[in-house]
Structures are given as C-alpha cells and as structure tokens.
Image (cartoon, rainbow, N blue to C red):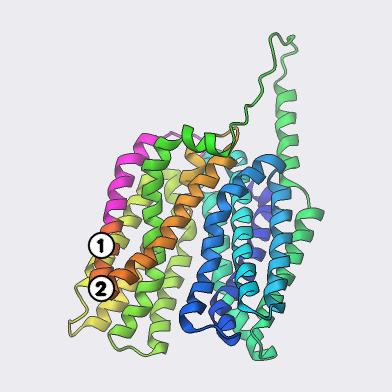
Amino acid sequence: MLWKFGPMVYLPTLLFSIGEGAVVPLIPVIAASRGATLASAGLIASALVVGQLCGNIPAGWLVAKVGERYTMVVAGSVALVAVSASALATNLALFSIAVFIAGMSAAAFGLARHAFMTTRVPLAFRARALSLLGGSFRAGMFVGPFLAAGLLGVFHTENAALWFFAVCLIGLILLVLLGPDPEAQAAAADEADLIAEDSGEPVSGSVPTIERAGVFRTMWRNRGVLSRLGLSAASLSAVRAARQVVLPLWGVSIGLDASSIALVVGVSGAIDFALFYASGQVMDRFGRLWAALPAMVLMGTGFLALSLTHDLDTKTLWFGMIAAVLGVGNGLSSGILLTLGADVAPQSEPAAFLGSWRTLNDAGGAVAPLIFSGIAAIASLAVGAAAMGVIGVLGAIGFLRFIPRFVPRRAVDEV
C-alpha cells in the first residue's frame, strides 16, 4: 500500500518541505535587507509560525468540505501567490503578510496529508507510514538550506530561494492535479472490497450516513483527549522547538565559535534525521508509549543535565554529548504526534479534529522559545534550559498517564 500511494503522498510533501526549507533560514535576512531592524526581522520570521498556528482550524474545515486533494491544490496555489508576492514586495508590511499567508498554506497542506493517512493507512503500519511522512518533512528542511546556499552562491540574491520555492510549488500543483488521485484509488479499492464481500442478500433498513459535526462541535466533543493527551503532545512540540533555540545560544554562551556550534547542531540534526523510521518501527511493533516515553525522558533529562554544565571545565564536551542525546530523543519522536493524532481522531471525519490537534502542537512549538527567552532574560540560560527540561519531564508523565487511556495497546496480527 505504501508503494501504491507513496509517490502521490510523499513526493508532494518532499517538494513543499524542500522549498520551505530553502526559504525559512533566509526570512530574517530578507527582512533585514528591506529595512527591518534585528528585532523586527525576528518578528517577521515568526509570522510563518503564527500563520501555521492560525491556519490549522480553517484547514480542517477546508479538508472536510473539498477533500485532501483539492485542499493541497488550494494550499499550493495560495502559497505560490504568497511566495511570489514576498519576492516582489518592496515594503515590510506586504512581505510580513505574504510570510503569514505562506504559513497558513503550510498548515493546510500538512493537514491534508495527515487526514488522508489517518483514514487510509491500516493500523498495522500506520506509525511507519506517518514516520515516513514526518521524515519527508525533515528531509526537506534538512536539504533545503544547502540548496539555498548554492542558489545564493550562483545568483547572489536571497530572492533566488523564494523563486526556487515557487518552482517547487508549481511542480507540486501539477503533480497533484495530473497524477493519480490517492483518494480515488482508495475509494475504488473500498468499493471493490464491498462488491467482493456482497452476499447477495437484500439490504433492509436505511443506509447509514455520516453526520458532519463541524470544527467547533468536534473540538467540544473531543475536549477530553485534547485537554489531556493533546497537552502532553504540545509539551513534546515545546521541547523540540526549544532544542533549536537552546543549543545555538548555549554554544555562544560557553565561548564556541560559529563553525563549532554549526558542527554540533549539525551532528545532532543528522542523528535526529537518521532515526525517523526507527520511531515508526517501535510504535508499530511495541506500542506508541515505547517511542513517546523514551523520547520525552531523553529530551527532558537532557535539558536538565545541560543546565548543570555551564560552568564546568568540561562544558564543551558535555555540550556535544547532550546535543547528541537531544538528537536521539528528537529522532525517536519522529511521527509520534502524527500517529497519536491519527489514533485518537474520529475515523469517519478526522480533518476537523486534526485541525485542533495540530493547533495545540503548533502552539507548544511557538510558545516554548518565548518562554525560554523570557526566563533566560530574567534569570540565566541555565535556568531557561532547566525549565525546558521540566516541561519535558511533565510531558513524559502525561504520556505515561494518557497514552494507555486514549490509545490502548492493540494486537496487530499483520505486523
């Protein structure tokens, strides 16, 4: 089934994430080149995350209305307009709006793929399939910056990365429109299964229909899982996002040069990327908790340990070792949020629920750097890192308590 749907599920995701990965590191640079101060450039860069946060719930409504395929087309087209506008923008206001809209488009695109995989991938290898989806995003974000560096070397302008993203979006739209529709293939397979199972007996009674509850009613109906397991998932997003902020700042604070910091962060990222499929294997074979709990324990205790090493003589060695531990923890968590969301979503109409689920996750990722920066400004980097460690430990306790409650271990004969 993965080979059947793979090209139309993973390839569009890879195209989108490569283009986005090429642009994301350059957003502050582009903003600064157009007159933004350092503070306002950082604020403009955060518009992408804010747009993604705000776009999840409308994306859930759109997927429920028009389906995953056309949502991807709409998201790609809107993103294409936004990226083109950002390349042509002559003022910061227009550039900021374009970045925000691109973030909303990214939310719609990601939710469309997530909803399709939720309803169509069998439980036997759901976690592996969603880990591959998460790995596609990670691969694009890993490769994109290197392509952006090459484009800068050739064209000597940051706009080259924006136009490269536009080309990726055009390819994505054409692929989704002209390629085989996974939804239609899956529906045809379901119809064939029904025909094969038809006993020839007359059908009595009414044909069941699916009631469309709507986004906000779905949120209310599932408030229990969202307020418990959803908050635990948000804590995972928080420590993931904190890792990307804490490690570079910690390297600067202990006196490392830029190349050494980049090497340590790069090795941590490589470990993270190398483990994305292992996470799916563990979840499918042993259960979701066996990947979620070790990941959170490693990242939570890693931040706590890091907070104690700032003034040690061996602080550089500790920095490298703990960065690797955080990479292992993050790698083991690949696909967990996608898989848990798919597990607890209503299978008949998952999009509205997944919009709320992804909003909580994105909120955790957006808030964590602000919490760390605020604590570091008031106290110190060590206290800020310790606070991220506490969030990680609390998240591990939440997963230990709520995954067995909402995602019971189910024996799967096909594995």
Q: Which x, y percent locates residue 381?
A: 27, 75
Asked whether residue 330 is in view, the answer is no
Question: As shown in the figure, which amino acid type bears the numbered disc 2?
Answer: Ile
Q: Quadrant of the N terminus?
A: top right
Is disc 1 surrounded by few (<14), some (14 to 19) or many (20+) residues within 10 Å?
A: many
Circle 1 residue: 301
Give the extent of the magenta segment.
Answer: 393-415
Q: Which residue: 56% across, 34% down?
A: 347
The kind of secondary structure element at disc 1 is helix
Q: Which residue: 38% across, 56% down?
A: 236
Membership of 258 in magenta stretch? no
Name the mark on residue 378.
Answer: 2
The kind of secondary structure element at disc 2 is helix
Q: Nearer the viewer, mark 1 or mark 2?
A: 2
Q: Is residue 75 above or below residue 157?
A: above
Asked whether residue 310 is in view, the answer is yes
Q: Is residue 168 above or below residue 91?
A: above
Majority secondary structure of magenta residues:
helix
Membership of 410 in magenta stretch? yes
Is disc 2 surrounded by few (<14), some (14 to 19) or many (20+) residues within 10 Å?
A: few
Q: Which residue: 33% across, 51% down?
A: 293
Q: Which residue: 69% across, 67% down?
A: 82
Q: How many marks?
A: 2
Q: Which x, y percent locates residue 384?
A: 27, 69
Which is nearer the eye, 16 or 227?
Answer: 227
Q: Quadrant of residue 244?
A: bottom left
Question: As shown in the figure, which amino acid type bears the numbered disc 1?
Answer: Thr
> Is 3 positioned to the left or the right of 217 in the image?
right
Q: Which x, y percent locates residue 119?
A: 60, 39
